[in-house]
Image (cartoon, helix red, strand yellow):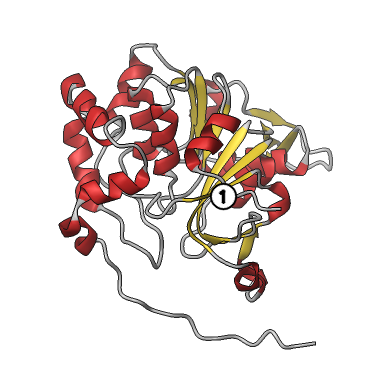
Amino acid sequence: MSKLISLQQAIAAYVRDGDLIYAAGFTHLIPFAAGHEIIRQGKKNLTLARATPDLIYDQMVAAGCAKKIIFSYMGNPGVGSLRIVRSALEKGELEWEEYSHFGMITRLQAGAAGLPFLPMNQTGATSLEQANPRIKRIPDPYGGKDVIVVPALNPDVAIVHVQRADSNGNAHLWGIIGEQKEAAFAAQKVILTAEEIVDESVIRSDPNRTMIPANIVDAVCHVPHASHPSYSQGYYDRDNEFYLAWDKISESQETITAYLDEWVYGVKDREEYWEKLGAKTHDRLKVDALYSEKINYGKY
């Protein structure tokens, strides 16, 4: 059965005020379009979890969507701090939990496996244990050194952007792979946005690339350019100019409000957003084709 609906419908149907949301993707395939739609629909009191919050959570916190953030590294990659989130944390306006990158992934793996927690090797980040009481040390039951344990993370909704999917929700990802698979399997609901919707036969032609299977997906949304200013490998490049520009935009409430008014509330969807960016930006972000070699799966 087709799960293909608009992004507006998906956010309205599956994201509720107070939910724990995981917008997945490690520098790559970050679902900005879904974040913008959550802002447009005025969702509130969300807990935003993500290994690297990136600009998407800076914008959602600026729009008043969040009550708490769960994260590992937090920053504007290659530029500096996430000014808005950092300011909210320093003012006590935002609850927070911090983990290491591997700690966040381990939490998702525990959630996906249906376990209450999972162990990790000890790390050098002992200050995280002091700052976060949910990170604990327990004895190795087999007599080795103590291990770190972190609790399972089961988001209410995971949002994953992919290069292509069929209408049932079977999805192909390639390039830098982050925590998309773990987040999807750990979540109660999964919203998938895709650069392309393809026939099921395309997905079946390369089954090893199917990282997200249909049986865990609730909604499939055709949203080209959904990850800008992040990138989608093979479709468009990372907009480094915007990451630099956001550092300036986020310096004052006036410029933040102006950005949200123009680029989030002022456009109805991602298609209108992309058109507004204009041909010059489109050309700057174009990527040349570079295809992998064919493989032979064999016919039986």
Q: SS for tag 1?
A: helix
Q: Which x, y percent locates residue 233?
A: 41, 64
Q: Determine whether 270 is above or below 165 in the image.
A: above
Q: Is residue 206 visible?
A: yes
Judging depth in this view, the residue of 27 and 163 nearest the camera is 163
Q: Which residue: 61% across, 57% down?
A: 167
Task: From the top left corner, tell me how far across and down residue 75 is, in percent.
Answer: 34, 37
The residue indicated by pointer 1 is 180
Q: Position of residue 3 (x, y in %)?
A: 64, 49
Q: Is residue 95 left or right of residue 300?
A: left
Report the front residue among 236 and 249.
236
What is the quadrant of residue 35 in the picture? top left
Residue type at numbered disc 1:
Gln
Residue 229 screen position, x and y as percent: 31, 48
Query: Which quadrant is home to the C terminus?
Result: bottom right
Task: Please identify the residue farthest to the top as the structure is shown.
Answer: 92
Q: Height in image: 28 above or below 133?
A: below
Q: Is residue 8 above or below residue 287?
A: above
Badge 1: few (under 14), some or many (20 or more) residues near its Cα, within 10 Å?
A: many
